[in-house]
Amino acid sequence: MNEKIGYLGPKGTFTKMAVDGLFHEGEKIEYKTIPACIDALNDDEVDVAVVPLENAIEGSVHITLDYLIHHVEVPIVAEIVLPIQQQLLVHPSFKGNLSDIKMVYSHTQAIAQCHQFIHRNLPNATIKDMSSTAEAAQFIMESNGEPVAAIGNKLAVSEYGLNILQESVHDYPNNHTRFAVLKKEKRSLPNVNITPQGEKTTVLVTLPRDYAGALHQVLSAFSWRKMNLSKIESRPMKTGLGNYFFIIDVNQPYDQVLFPGVQSELEALGCKTRILGSYSTYTLSEQMLKKVSVS
């Protein structure tokens, strides 16, 4: 079956690199925004959707989390971890240097990942936000050699015929992004290129009210069962100041003993729980990405 795979586009985004690295076949369809990509899955336009979830430097991609929690109920069925290398890209006819750049275009997350580089090397450049790094690269290709640049990846170089003015402009070397693979049906993904490195379950916990020791009680339900948590994050419930829910990543698959026990214990405390997904985790190495960038 040739499944349709939606992703945050256009061609040349890190999300597209994640899709190419994980799936060796399928019809890959680009969407301009994260909500549009998730809506396409929810409306059955695509079978799978891949969207950014968290960056090691800038943290969670809040629009993804909020959309999955407040607007749709589609499960996470896999996770892809991608090493992120940002490049400063220019039109091939641009012959200047860093000091000549007047405008820098990119996604807000990419700009934040390169904040110190921009501060030190492009202090006079104006920053312009774009919906993705690839859209920024596409814009630069249409700039006809003006003193403007985009922050993006090497896939965008080959997709749009750009030059790299400066390599590795991200501020921290250990820059990785997690991408969520979403699918309505919770069965295994077909035609995956690589072997999973682990299993994870993401749980949403809503407290009945803000009271002393509430979070401690929630975490204790996992702790005494010796369940290892890799992430705990609070997000606003959007019902008023001070109202939050918690997103918890547990480093093991959902089972019929421990997780139901946790849910029953938390519900006895007045909490609400929801499993956002129980899934395999995949990691793409830099060597794998080099193959994707030139394919």
Image (cartoon, helix red, strand yellow):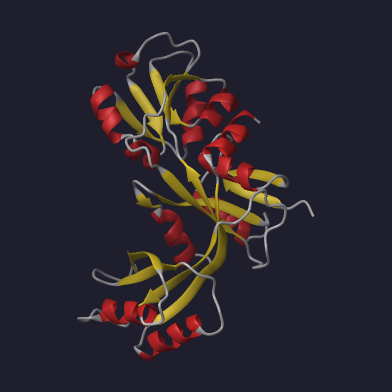
- Which residue is at a point 56% across and 64% down the rendered structure image? 279
Is there any visible trace of residue 257 in the rendered image?
yes
- Identify which residue, 283 or 114, lies in the foreground: 283
The single residue placed furthest to the bottom in the displayed view is: 268
Count the labels in the image.
0
In the figure, 197 relative to 131: above or below? below
Residue 36 x %, y %: 55, 51
Placement of the C terminus among the 4 image quadrants: top right
- Which residue is at a point 42% across and 14% down the rendered structure image? 146
Residue 97 x %, y %: 35, 12
Is there any visible trace of residue 76 in the rendered image?
no
Residue 30 x %, y %: 61, 43
In the figure, 65 relative to 93: above or below? below
In the figure, 10 relative to 43: above or below? above
Residue 105 x %, y %: 40, 30
**Which image quarter: residue 70?**
bottom left
The single residue placed furthest to the left in the displayed view is: 212
Left or right position of 243 against 64: left
